[in-house]
Amino acid sequence: MASWPDQPSTDYGFLNAALAEADADAFVAVGDRFDDDMRYLTRFSGPDRDYAFVFVGDTATLCAPALFEEQANREFSGDVVRMENVGDPAGERARAVLDDALDGTGTVLVPQGIPHDTALYLERGGYELQSTSAVTDARAVKTEEELDCLRRVQRATARGMARAEEILAEASAEGGELLWKGAPLSTERLRRQVNATLASYGVRDAGNTVIGAGPSCADLHFTGTDDIAPGETVLLDISPRGPHGYYGDLTRTFVVDGDGGWERRAYVAVEAAQTAAFDELESGAGVAASAVHREAAAEIAAYGFSVGEEPGFTHGTGHGVGVSLHEAPSLRADEPLEAGMVVTVEPGVYDSSQGGVRIEDLVVVTEDGYEVLAAYPTGIVPQKR
Amino acid sequence: MASWPDQPSTDYGFLNAALAEADADAFVAVGDRFDDDMRYLTRFSGPDRDYAFVFVGDTATLCAPALFEEQANREFSGDVVRMENVGDPAGERARAVLDDALDGTGTVLVPQGIPHDTALYLERGGYELQSTSAVTDARAVKTEEELDCLRRVQRATARGMARAEEILAEASAEGGELLWKGAPLSTERLRRQVNATLASYGVRDAGNTVIGAGPSCADLHFTGTDDIAPGETVLLDISPRGPHGYYGDLTRTFVVDGDGGWERRAYVAVEAAQTAAFDELESGAGVAASAVHREAAAEIAAYGFSVGEEPGFTHGTGHGVGVSLHEAPSLRADEPLEAGMVVTVEPGVYDSSQGGVRIEDLVVVTEDGYEVLAAYPTGIVPQKR
């Protein structure tokens, strides 16, 4: 059982810079374990109720519910103060930490989606709030430690994909049905096998194992049960989460016993679009994010598919991945990509009457190009890997 | 492969009652897929970015990002309106829905933790906000449909526990190590087996498979890697999430090759405490939640362990479970339990120098007693089930 890289650390230099730029005195965030800004700021895998992070005078403090104090001390590198009772408002506790340093006056930077009750606690305590995108911006550029986590999760993701591909390679078409081990193969049956494989590699499916068959491939987030028929596109989008909170993201499309019709044309177009996107990324840091999407879309159009509507390429070419499955940057944005940004490259073509084809890989932008995290083969006919 | 019950529906009668009681005009909530109030209100398994729920004039509306429109229509029973762009603020879209019905004036009920930017959008649109606990209160009492989901998830949870127990029964003590299939058994290795089993039954571990060994049992949320030694308490707390968002919650403690010392005393005390709690629940709806905790704690104390501090019984006896793993009611509250409330009953005793023992089952309170969801045997010596 290979071990995981250490938990990455968070360098709060970006908060000092944001405070200096805004001439502000402190930063406060409140959320629960499902708030990915909080995960990034604290590395605390935390409770399913609100806790608070306070950064003031170059000191980071975590206000943790008493029952989670041991876990907070284990995971968080700064000071931990406890909230005695489960129901205590985290915003009230955060205000007390601010009061120790600022005495009820000053400007506090907060994420724009901070809970409203927290905002009111701080404002009533005499602080002026100002929203900041500093955390979102910092998260978009990964450190080496973060890249190690992302590579590791993506390798486990590839193991899940290999399991799905193996099952599809073993499946046989009989009387209009696709059978595996003597029983009809459904999207749900395939999903359970993929998710069990992910679990055995120490990552969790996080509810993100999207598997479509034929028409349901056009539904970008299909997690239901459809029997898989021979000749249908089977689209697998696997995005598990690793123990430090980082996601993988990998999509492949297969057809068992296909007739080489629509899905072959779509596959060729999508492969060409991904290659065009990679070509654009070859210049590395500085390339405009939107140029990557534009090149992919142009290629899809060159193969006679629509862009921006169904049937055709209905979504963007990619998004950032980190402690959120979707985070900055978007490949629709006009900003230049920076070294250390991790993005998906995932062109796709969908037609509800035919099916859907998408290929997705995860790459990190480097100074002079890009690196694919855990490369995985392409090909519409499933193989045993 | 057994199929799942249908997705439960949500009856908005409680919102009408809350609006009437507060003399308010509408209810608005905003959150992402990790916001369990949103899951309960909409049944939308949703995007990892904000979406909005608006209830006004007896009409429920979901404002969904365009890329998730198909999924929203599939899962949500009310009206779906789309937000064109990924970055559009959900609060702004919610205000537009309100404006159609209320024309910029009225009182809007919101959960107290609504995102601050949403609150500002609504207030600047002319609406007065008032916080409500109506959703929290409604969630605490389960419908028959919800109970079916909870029973089903708890049965899958029991399969995960049976797998762990089987592995521990197969493990052997050799030279101070606990070996399974020829290699040392660690908490992480055991966790992967449990999580793979959960996945094969169609539920996901949700990052909640807590397994402690000896000292790490006293850390209530230990998810790290420890080798398991013969004679140590092995505490497994398994809380997976099913496809409709409902959680299971089951804890057992085992010792392989124990010497019958501290852990036997602790086990007897904890079993007696759980029995005392069940005895209190036998009167059914109307019993004070805190009485259940009081009875369990008294029994722990009668066996010579402390209550409220380590070494001893350091937490409460139980909490509600639904679309959140921890929700109302708490067994520390003085309010009477109602029929349909689902709570854990989980006394435990911890000593960092010895280990920890906890037994936890999930029960639903009925008019005249209680029902254990998916009963699972107890016993400190692991058995093949």
Image (cartoon, coloured by chain):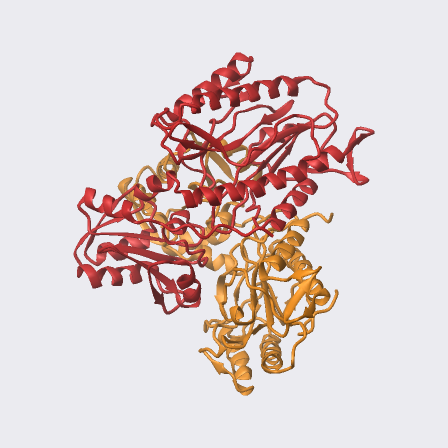
Chain colours: A orange, B red
Left or right: residue B258 versus residue B343 is right
Residue A56 rendering spot, x and y as whole percentages: 42, 43
Name the residue: 73% across, 49% down. Answer: A2
Q: Residue at x 40, y 31 (%)?
A: B366
Q: Nearer the viewer, residue B73 or A26?
A: B73
- Displayed quadrant of residue B172: top right
Q: Quadrant of residue B101?
A: bottom left
Count of numbered badges drawn on the protein: 0
Residue A176 showing in the rendered view = yes
Side of B42 where B206 appears, left or right: right
The image position of residue B255, as x and y in percent, is 69, 27
Quarter of the rendering occupied by the C terminus of chain B: top right
Above or below for B111 versus A247 = above
Q: As drawn, is A25 to the left or to the right of B57?
A: right
| Residue A169 relative to residue B243: left or right | right
- The answer to whether any part of residue A364 appears in the image is no
Relative vertical location of residue A350 with respect to residue A49 in this rendering, above or below:
below
Q: Is residue A187 above or below residue B17?
A: below
**Which x, y percent locates residue A343?**
56, 66
Residue B74 in percent (x, y) is at 42, 62
Q: Nearer the viewer, residue A257 or B103?
A: A257
